[in-house]
Amino acid sequence: MTRVQILLPEDEDRALERLARSRGESKSNLVRRAVALLFRLEADQGEPLLGLIGQAGKAGGRRGARDHDRILARAAREQSRR
């Protein structure tokens, strides 16, 4: 890993500290995750909805049409843990 130093406004640093504490993570880890998310978003610029394809995994038959919001929300939570 490479060390990077950044300057944040005080209010953003405090908010980052609260978020890190509430999640049981370091501020550094949250920043690394945010950078990774930014790169994924930039890579998906062509068609943002295409990035959702396959995120839910096997939806379980016909439930996908009825429960798509719940399925996608669960997939997003699982992906954010990675």
Image: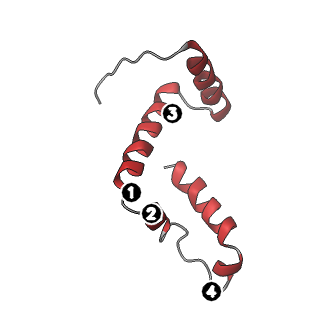
| Label 3 with label 1: CB-CB less than 8 Å | no
Q: For residue 63, which quarter of the picture?
A: bottom right
Q: Mark 3 points at which residue?
A: 30
Q: Do the residues labelled 3 and 4 touch (CB within 8 Å)?
A: no
Give yes or no for contact between labels 1 and 2 (Cβ–Cβ under 8 Å).
yes
> Horizontal and vertical percent for residue 62?
65, 86
How packed mark 4 is, by other alpha carbons closer than 10 Å (few <14, some 14-19, many 20 or more), is few
Report which residue position mark 2 lands on. Answer: 51
The residue tagged 4 is 61
Q: Residue at horizontal 34%, vertical 53%?
A: 43
Residue, disc 1: 44
- The Cα atoms of the two marked residues, 3 and 4, are separated by 36 Å
Against 54, residue 51 (above or below) is above
Residue density around tag 3, few if under 14, some if 14–19, many if 20 or more, within 10 Å: some
Say which element carries label 2: helix
Disc nearest the viewer among 3 and 2 = 2
Query: Is residue 44 found left or right of 66 in the rendered image?
Result: left
Disc 4 to disc 1, how far (Cα)?
Answer: 27 Å
